[in-house]
Amino acid sequence: MSLYTVSDLHLDERGEARLFADDRQGRQLAELCERIARDQGSELILLGDCFDFTAMQPPPKGLAKFFQRLKVPKEPPPRRELPALLAAVRESNPVAFEALAQLSQRAQLTIVPGNHDHHLGAPEAAQLLAGHGVRARIERSCVRTLGEKTVVLQHGHELDEGNEEPGGSGEVMTNALHQAVIPWLRHKGAPRNVRMDPDRIVALRPEEAVISVLQRWTDEASFRRFYRAFLRLLAENGYLPRPVGFLAGYISANRVRSAVDKADRLWERTAVHAFEAVKGKRKLPHDAPRPDALVLGHTHVIDWAVAEERLYVNLGTWTERAIDASSPQDRSMPLLQLDAVEGALRAVLSDLSRSNLELQRYEGSRVKSSTM
């Protein structure tokens, strides 16, 4: 029996840009589900942001004005409730959805709501998933015992100020990138002698790096017009103080870049919180116990550390993560497998995109049997 976990799949719908490709990540997920189904008694935990519902929603306010200011011939799409969002994701990802449905008939499937799919915290979410053939247990915080060790698994957005609550600044930025910036880029097109990939925008981490990337893809005048309209859109939806939106023309891109630098250290700040929790110096969200192993996602950066025979793992993401305008994207698919051998915790982190290449391994001290 093993505990398998992956994080940040970001299944979404066909549209202007998407992070999950059903013909690549979906097929790999199907292979993983079949592997887990054959491992009797095992469980798959999807550790947050399995679905990217926030990317499928327009900003609550100001999108029509944004399109008008930049002369984008597009009407804002309507905001949708969970049933419609789930149906759209299923239609766009038949391979992945069928794999999860089949696994849920043969093994335990647990889904942890993240900041991009916090909608799964609704009381009717499990029933709605079952209506699409996916029978899953939904838990905000997973606590499992392997051997004599306590494993805590959480998405980790609770440690990120902009994403800890639904409707926060992180959600506003996601809405704006997918539903405002991408349509503008596709309408405008690439300048001469510049290769532009609008889909890369939604793969950027941190998302605020969009400012530097767009400066490389647009002429100065177009960037200024976009920048003013974009800041106004963010301000109208609470990402920035409203007066800042009206003074958008006076805010330098360098000030935004300083915010990017801060956001880019999210994985380090998360690790600090994780170490303190592992050492018993900080309580975890959801009243989780002190863990022997703590597993998080959210940051989209793989992390692995051992302190005093206790383990911290951040699973990174299955999305094709980008950090700039032109470099190759990270196509890794991290999988963590946890089990117990003679009472000792064993953890193996591997990359499914490279034939299950082992990245890290942890084997705790074995429990000594008592003698009579």
Image (cartoon, grey):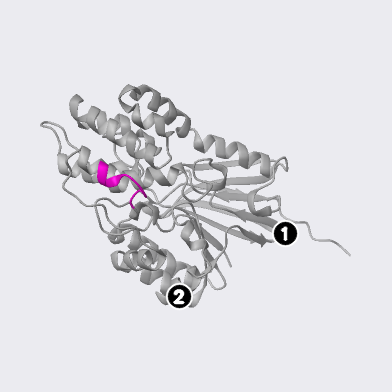
Give the percent coordinates (x, y) of residue 275.
Answer: 64, 39
Residue at image point 19% right, 50% down? 74
Q: Residues within 10 Å of mark 1 (few under 14, many from 20)?
A: some
Q: Which residue matches tag 2? A: 130
Q: Which one is in front in this view, the residue at disc 2 or the one at disc 1? A: 2
Main SS of the magenta segment? loop
Image position, residue 308 (x, y; %):
70, 41
Q: Earlier in the sequence, mark 2 or mark 1?
A: 2
On whether residue 106 falls in the magenta region, the answer is no
> Looking at the picture, how far across and down is residue 113, in whole percent?
51, 58
Q: Give the residue type at disc 2.
A: Ala
Magenta-span inclusion, residue 63:
yes
Q: Is residue 38 visible?
A: no
User: In what quadrant of the picture does the N terminus appear?
Assistant: bottom right
Q: Secondary structure at mark 2?
A: helix
The number of discs equals: 2
Q: Label 1: which residue?
A: 148
Q: Is residue 344 left or right of residue 337?
A: right
Looking at the rendering, the stretch of residues picked out in magenta corresponds to: 58-65
* Quadrant of the rendering where the C terminus is positioned: bottom right
For badge 1, the amino acid type reads: Glu
Q: Is 209 placed left or right of 148 in the picture?
A: left
